[in-house]
């Protein structure tokens, strides 16, 4: 049973202007509780290192609690779990990071403290090479009975390929969002997000009405780095979010791994740079990852996953599948135009077909029948 009063104060503290996660924890330690922070006298607040007049006034302003009450209503209505950094089910790996979020809003169900968790990140402009590496790594981790939670950021490219591969192999997967839970960005990934909720979770530190913004995606990268045992960079240009995540993971003394690529490949330059500068261990396959993480291979007994010979398809699924069989590849937008159906429906159907092993997604929103 959620203690709504305690939750209101926790959310309220998270909403105060000028109070970040580090300062918030300092305030709680000084006042003895979250509620105590709001009941503290201004003169006492000013004695706390780092708390000035403006921040003290923000804490004293009880209007922030009114906004927190609205957030609590949203949490109740949509059955969202809230993990406070002192809760026993808060991710332990993340709690040990100095700038870990005060609160996490979670939609789904996953054990954040299970034995094996890895983050897989990379460029939004993934090549077929990057996609193949991602899918092979995740499928082999499942085959060898490691069954880790796969963490990524639900973005285009390597992120979404990692989530899809995890779902396809029945591994739990967690998407760390750079916005609140009222929306999903990019909208094209809503069908995948719905599947993630069934076998994993959507996680964010942002209140429900916070919209996607570039600084928020940079900020959420510390959660991707901190919540797992290791961060794996599959493909990356010389700049980008994946390299930021790798740098943060290094600052947390976490393992970082990178797949190398050819020296002239644009989206391997970031990985090669990480390896060259000793910011990441070079890995070429699952064996390397097992060895470096100390995971003993526990291969399943000759389990073979076969594509279903007879799959019952809905009318929309059959219509789209037959269209894909007519020629080698189709772009998502062209499918929508050709069939006069909305993108949301087409994306959902393609995802189901992909999970059934009938369709393969390619970079550039391309799809082909298998």
Image (cartoon, rainbow, N blue to C red):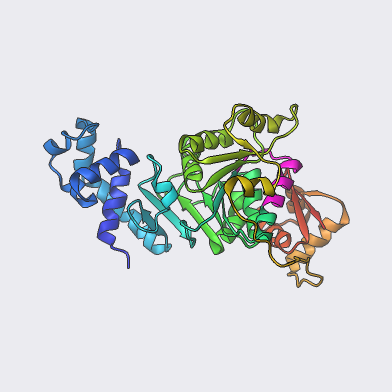
Q: Is residue 306 left or right of residue 66?
A: right
Quadrant of image for the C terminus:
bottom right
338 to 315, vertically: above or below: above
Instruction: Using the image as rendered, state which of residue 359 and residue 228 is in the foreground.
Output: 228
Q: Position of residue 61 (x, y in %)?
A: 21, 42
- Residues 232 and 167: in front is 232
Residue 355 falls in image quadrant: bottom right
Chain part drawn in magenta: 121-137
- Quadrant of the image for the N terminus? bottom left
- Where residue 295 sits: x, y (%)? 59, 53
Residue found 24% across the figure and 35% down from its top: 55
Q: Nearest the camera: 46 or 49?
A: 49
Q: Position of residue 314 (x, y in %)?
A: 73, 70
Q: How many marks?
A: 0
Horizontal relation, residue 139 to residue 211: left or right = right
> In the displayed structure, would residue 98 be above or below residue 187?
above
């Amino acid at each position: 049973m959620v203690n709504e009063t305690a939750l209101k104060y926790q959310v309220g503290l998270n909403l105060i202007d000028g109070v970040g996660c580090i300062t918030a924890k300092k305030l709680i330690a000084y006042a003895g509780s979250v509620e105590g922070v709001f009941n503290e006298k201004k003169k006492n607040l000013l004695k706390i290192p780092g708390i000035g007049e403006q921040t003290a006034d923000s804490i004293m302003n009880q209007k922030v609690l009114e906004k927190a009450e609205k957030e609590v209503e949203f949490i109740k209505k949509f059955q969202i779990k809230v993990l406070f950094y002192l809760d026993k089910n808060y991710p332990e790996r993340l709690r040990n990071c100095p700038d870990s979020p005060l609160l996490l809003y979670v939609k789904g169900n996953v054990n954040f403290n299970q034995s094996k968790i890895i983050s897989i990140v990379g460029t939004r402009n993934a090549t077929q090479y990057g996609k193949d590496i991602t899918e092979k790594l995740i499928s082999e981790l499942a085959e060898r009975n490691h069954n880790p939670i796969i963490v990524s950021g639900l973005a285009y490219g390597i992120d979404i390929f990692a989530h899809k591969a995890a779902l396809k192999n029945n591994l739990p997967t967690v998407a760390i969002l750079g916005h609140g839970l009222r929306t999903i960005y990019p909208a094209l990934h809503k069908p995948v997000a719905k599947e993630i909720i069934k076998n994993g979770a959507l996680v964010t530190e942002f209140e429900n009405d916070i919209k996607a913004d570039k600084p928020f995606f940079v900020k959420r990268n510390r959660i991707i780095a901190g919540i797992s045992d290791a961060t794996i960079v599959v493909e990356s240009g010389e700049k980008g979010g994946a390299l930021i995540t790798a740098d943060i993971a290094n600052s947390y003394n976490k393992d970082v791994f990178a797949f190398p690529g050819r020296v002239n490949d644009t989206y391997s330059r970031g990985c090669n740079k990480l390896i060259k500068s000793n910011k990441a261990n070079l890995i070429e396959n699952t064996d390397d990852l097992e060895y470096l993480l100390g995971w003993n291979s526990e291969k399943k007994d000759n389990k073979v996953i076969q594509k279903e010979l007879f799959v019952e398809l809905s009318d929309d699924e059959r219509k789209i599948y037959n269209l894909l069989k007519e020629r080698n590849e189709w772009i998502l937008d062209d499918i929508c135009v050709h069939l006069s159906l909305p993108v949301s429906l087409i994306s959902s159907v393609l995802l189901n077909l992909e999970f059934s092993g009938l369709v393969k997604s390619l970079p550039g929103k391309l799809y082909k029948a298998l």
